[in-house]
Image (cartoon, rainbow, N blue to C red):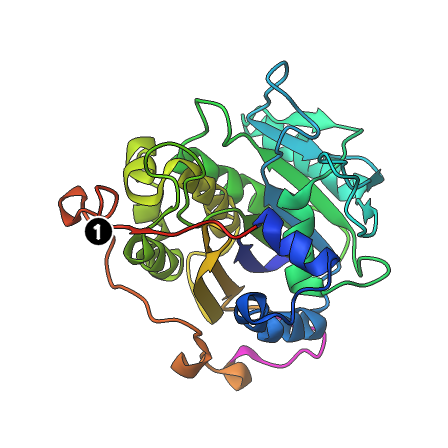
Amino acid sequence: MARIIAGVTSSHVPAIGAAIDNRKTGEPYWQRVFSGFEKSKEWMEKTKPDVVIAVYNDHASAFSVELIPTFALGCAAEFPPADEGWGPRPVPVVKGHPALASHIAQSVILDEFDLTIVNRMEVDHGLTVPLNLMFGSPKEWPCPVIPLAVNVVMYPPPTGHRCYMLGRAIRKAVASYPEDLRVVIMGTGGMSHQISGPRAGLINSKFDKAFLDGLTRDPRKLARIPHVEYMREAGAEGIEMVMWLIMRGALDDKVKEVYRFYTVPASNTAVGHIILENVQRTTKSRRPASARGSAPKGRRAAAASPTLPSPASGGGKGGGLIVRSKR
């Protein structure tokens, strides 16, 4: 039987992709960002998933204001990189897993989640940048990827609770697939940022770090955060973090935090990243869970706050850091 073994979150800042494509990752500004993903690439190389489910949002590449699906599952055999205005990124074509994707679609729809099934779709930086951060820049992506596009661009986006419950439905679907596959699910986007308006450049590190804490300790609390709180505390584009809750819902209730990283800023965005493993995860080496132990606190690349800030904390009312964009 297939099983989800771990979940990963990652920001998908387009400027990160530009830094990779233009070979600027070694510059001082960008080195700070990319160094935080070195351990992550090592983890992914060691884990060697058979399939990745990548939760991301489309940026008017595959969809537009004429067609806005809330949840769109890619069931095609391949997904070429989109031309976002300056030509497609020089990254490999994403190879899909139509059999597993179709199985997920059937299971989830019968569980009363109304997915849009997409059999032809281009993918943009929202998906390819996180793949670069986790896999590097190979000639071919090392495993099939199933894209799940979520509308967080046009109002109304799905609630955090809806996303969390969709993750649980995906976990059930994967577990009922007969082939022995080891699956990693990725939630992308975020963290706090706002790209326009009077609060353009807002970053709220306190909210972000508390959100990272909640992914490990209390995801159900995160699932209750309303849209308005994301906007107030994390900026207009902070709503992208509901996609992380699909990842978390797809994992077991109890998880092991393997690694986290947080830095400010990349362009005008707070970069956040976490790796969570299911506690009873079985690897190809069949090493028992007791031998793996808990992730040492030293593996964390950033400190964390214990609780989510309340509106009274002023996190999104001028309490956040305003940064200037570097493109």
Q: Is residue 55 above or below residue 293?
A: above
Residues shaded magenta: 282-289
Residue 228's quadrant in the figure?
Answer: top left
Residue 145 x/y as whole percent? 74, 49
Residue 301 x/y as whole percent? 44, 74
Decide whether residue 158 is among the magenta residues.
no
Q: Is residue 279 above or below residue 163?
A: below
Side of 267 where 44 appears, left or right: right
Which residue position holds label 1?
A: 309
Q: Residue, x 51% and y 29% (percent of image)?
A: 153
- Mostly what secondary structure, the magenta segment? loop
Q: Residue, x 55% and y 58% (percent of image)?
A: 7
Residue furthest bottom in the image? 291
Decide whether residue 286 is among the magenta residues.
yes
Can residue 182 be seen in this snapshot? Answer: no
Q: Is residue 321 above or below residue 152?
A: below
Side of 2 where 218 appears, left or right: left
Q: For the residue marked with disc 1, what is the amino acid?
A: Pro
Residue 319 x/y as whole percent? 22, 50
Q: Residues within 10 Å of mark 1 (few under 14, many from 20)?
A: some
Side of 20 where 197 appears, left or right: left
Side of 197 where 183 appears, left or right: right
Residue 143 x/y as whole percent? 79, 57
Residue 22's quadrant in the figure?
Answer: bottom right
SS at badge 1? loop
